[in-house]
Amino acid sequence: MSNFIFQLNPIIQALIATIFTWGVTALGASLVFMFKKMHKNILDGMLGIAAGVMIAASFWSLLSPAISMAETLKMNTMLVVASGFLAGGLLLFIGDKVTSKINKNSSFERRKRIIMLISSITLHNIPEGLAVGVAFGSTLYGLDGANLMSAWTLALGIGIQNFPEGLAVSAPLRREGVSRKKSFLIGQLSGIVEPIAGVLGAILVLSMRTMLPFLLAFAAGAMIYVVTEELIPESQTNESKDLMAMCSLIGFTIMMVLDVLLG
C-alpha cells in the first residue's frame, strides 16, 4: 500500500497527506464527545493547554521554519519574518476593534471570541497546508534536497500537532455553550483548508516557496494575538490560576516535544 502511494503523482500525494492532517484535526476535535457535561475546571484547563500548544506551535511550526526558509531563499530574514508576524496580529487586532464597534452586547462578545479563535487556527492551517504541498511539489519539479520521504515526514509532524489544535477549537466552543456535535463540526472544519492549500502549494511550488516565510510568520502572529487576548485571560478566570498556568506549560511542553522529535 505504501509503495503504491509513493508511486502516485506528487500532487495527489500532497492531497492524501493533507487529508490525513485534516483527519487528525477532526480526531482532536472529537474529544468533546468524551464528556457529557464539562466541568468549568476541565474546560479552563483545556483552554490553558490550548494556549500552551498554540504558543509552542507558533515558534516551532511557524516562526522557526519561516526563518530557515527566508535564510535559504536569501531574503531579508528579519524584515520578512517580523513584518509577517506583526501583520498577522494586526489583522486580528483591527478585526477585534471593528466587530466591537458593530455590536457590544454580551452574547456578541462571546461569538466574537469564538470567531477569533477559529480564524486564528484556520490562518495557522493555511501555511501549514502550503508547506506540505510545497514539499511534495518540490519533488515534482526536481528541486535540490527534495524527496518524498521528507515530505511525508513533514506531513506526519503537522498531522500529529493538529490533534491538540482540533481540541483547541472545539473545547472553547463547548465552554461557550455550543453543543458537542456543533463544537466538533466547527473544530474539524478549521482544518479543511489544509487539503486545499496543500494542492495549491504543490501546483504553484515555485512561486509559493517565496511567499511561505511571510505566510508562516503571519499565522504565528495571529495565533499569539488570540492566545494573549482570549485564551490565557479566559483560563485565568478560574479560581486555581496557578493550576491553569501549569496547564499552559504542559500544553507548551507537549507541542514542543512533538515538533522537536518530528521536526
Image (spheres, rainbow, N blue to C red):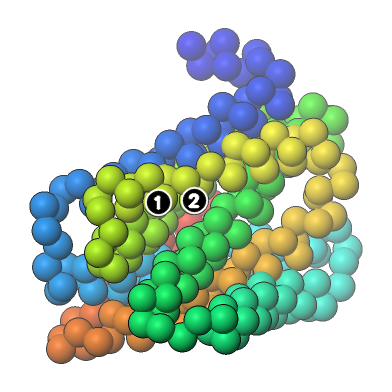
Mark 1–mark 2 contact, CB under 8 Å?
yes
Question: Which residue bears the numbered disc 1?
Answer: 187
Quarter holding residue 193: top right
Query: Disc 1 versus disc 2: distance between alpha carbons?
Result: 6 Å
Q: Residue at x 67, y 47 (%)?
A: 131
Q: Which mark is residue 14?
A: none
Q: Which mark is residue 190?
A: 2
Q: Is 160 in front, or is 177?
A: 177
Question: What is the x, y in percent for residue 57?
Answer: 50, 63
Question: What is the x, y in percent for residue 211?
Answer: 81, 57
**CA neighbours of label 2 inside 10 A, class few (<14), some (14 to 19), many (20+):** many
Q: Residue at x 38, y 45 (%)?
A: 185
Question: What is the x, y in percent for residue 79?
Answer: 82, 78
Q: Is residue 18 left or right of residue 248?
A: right
For badge 1, the amino acid type reads: Gly
Q: Residue at x 54, y 63 (%)?
A: 119
For badge 2, the amino acid type reads: Ser
Q: Is residue 101 visible?
A: yes
Vertical side of 42 occupied by 33: above or below: above
Q: Is residue 10 left or right of residue 144?
A: left
Question: What is the x, y in percent for residue 21?
Answer: 49, 40
Count of numbered tags: 2
Q: Is residue 141 left or right of residue 87?
A: right
Vertical side of 204 occupied by 93: above or below: below
Q: Is residue 56 visible?
A: no
Vertical side of 110 occupied by 97: above or below: below
Q: Is 81 in front, or is 203?
A: 203
**CA neighbours of label 1 inside 10 A, class few (<14), some (14 to 19), many (20+):** many
> Dot 2: what SS?
loop
Q: Residue at x 84, y 55 (%)?
A: 210
> Dot 1: what SS?
helix
